[in-house]
Amino acid sequence: MEVLAFLVIVALVIVIKGLRIINQYERGVVLRLGKYKRTLSPGLNVVNPFFDKVTKVDVRTRPMDIPKQEVITKDNVTVNVDAVVYAKVINPQKAVLETTDFRYATSTFAQTALRDITGNFELDEILSKREEISEKIREIVDVQTDKWGIDIESVKLQNIELPSDMKRAMAKQAEAERERRAAVISADGEKAAAKAVSEAAELLAKTPGGLNIRTLQTLEKISTDPSQKTVVLLPSDLAGKLGKM
């Protein structure tokens, strides 16, 4: 009985030692004597505690910062660009077996792709075509990381730092553009006002007594102060009508 109890205890210890709990967001890659055996699903799993080695792999989408890279653009301007890559493990077996560190490998390759792609664009294009550049980087990195079981969901360019002299030049250019727009708007306003005055004058000239009425309205506005003396030369037809009143 004592021997049987001992064997039962040993068996229980072995079973308990071989239990592995895999979280819902993980997968477990099992190597038996150094060779791939299977991939554990979420939940409670039993493995051989003596011959099996379990490596847990997080399969959630993970953002990876791409450090600032110095890039020489197509028009020979030096800029510093950084980005963020959103990656997800879709094949845990490849992620463990095909690279020593899939996160580091993905980040390093993304840095290279970032420098290569942005270097093929001019500065104005980098500033205005962020989405297009990001998509090109994503496509290149996704092709490479596919062999590592990694899916690149998206790449986003974050900061684009320009040289100080370039910033000053762009600020002057923006100021000049604002002044140009203001001048155009002012000229358009003056043009519209002149057109309206011309149309009004033409209408008054065609209306019988229109100019006379307008003159009287003007006299009414400038004679509000009793101490003010104003000399006005009236049209002969209007003066004659006023003399008869």
Image (cartoon, helix red, strand yellow):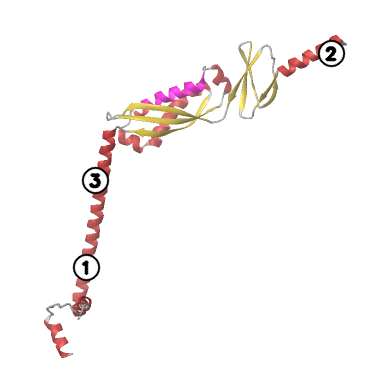
Residue position marked by numbered label 1 in the rendering: 197
Q: Is residue 117 left or right of 170 when viewed as pictured?
A: right
Part of the protein shown in magenta: 101-116
Residue position marked by numbered label 2 in the rendering: 5
103 in magenta: yes
Quadrant for the C terminus in the image: bottom left
Residue 35 drawn at (x, y percent) = 61, 12
Whether label 1 touches label 2, CB < 8 Å: no
Question: Please, is residue 149 above or below residue 185 in the view?
Answer: above
Quadrant for the N terminus in the image: top right
Kind of residue sitting beneath label 3: Ala
Query: Badge 3: how crowded within 10 Å, few (<14), some, or many (20+)?
Result: few
Nearest the viewer among 195 and 236 is 236
Query: Badge 2: how crowded within 10 Å, few (<14), some, or many (20+)?
Result: few
Kind of residue sitting beneath label 1: Val
SS label for mark 2: helix
First in residue order: circle 3 vs circle 1: 3
Nearer the observer: mark 3 or 1; the answer is 3
* Marks 3 and 2, how far apart at CA: 92 Å
How many marks on residues? 3
Question: Please, is residue 115 above or below residue 202 in the view?
Answer: above
SS label for mark 3: helix
Identity of the residue furthest to the bottom in this view: 244
The numbered disc on residue 176 is 3
Kind of residue sitting beneath label 2: Ala
